[in-house]
Image (spheres, grey):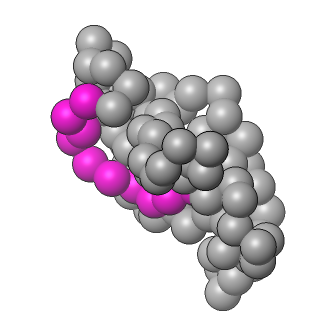
Amino acid sequence: MVRIRLKRIGRRHKPSYRVVAVDVRRSRDGRVIEELGFYDPGHKNPALRWNLKLDRIDHWISVGAQPSETVAQLIAKAQKQPAEQV
């Protein structure tokens, strides 16, 4: 089973994340199938806090991948924004 979730990158006390498609049996920072975007909660510009490849995310969801709760919230926010800002 494939899950769409966050992979932590960055340094201590300043995390940033990649949104990835990964097998559910892998660890949080383990090998991924595909990178689908990023999320940087500490970025000063709110418009640049995340960037998601919504077309690839839709593909993974259509083949049965389940997004985590946090990623589902990010996807909902990204879909509400106009396409030129994402």
Q: Nearer the viewer, residue 37 or 12?
A: 12
Q: Residue at x 79, y 63 (%)?
A: 80
x, y percentage for residue 6? 49, 38
Counting labels gives 0
Q: Residue at x 33, y 53 (%)?
A: 35
What secondary structure do most residues of the magenta stretch adopt? strand
Please tell me in which quadrant of the rendered image residue 82 appears.
bottom right
Eyeballing the image, is 59 above or below 52? above
Query: Could you tell whether 68 is left or right of 36 in the image?
Result: right
Eyeballing the image, is 37 above or below 64? below
Q: Residue at x 27, y 19 (%)?
A: 26
Q: Which residues are magenta?
A: 30-39
x, y percentage for residue 58? 47, 50
Q: Residue at x 61, y 51 (%)?
A: 14
Residue with the most extreme bottom position: 84
Query: Could you tell whether 31 is left or right of 52 in the image?
Result: left
Does the magenta run of residues contain 55? no
x, y percentage for residue 60? 37, 42
The quarter of the picture where the N terminus appears is top left
The quarter of the picture where the C terminus appears is bottom right
Residue 32 visible, this angle: yes
Residue with the most extreme top position: 25
Residue 17 visible, this angle: no
Does the magenta run of residues contain 35? yes
Eyeballing the image, is 37 above or below 48? above
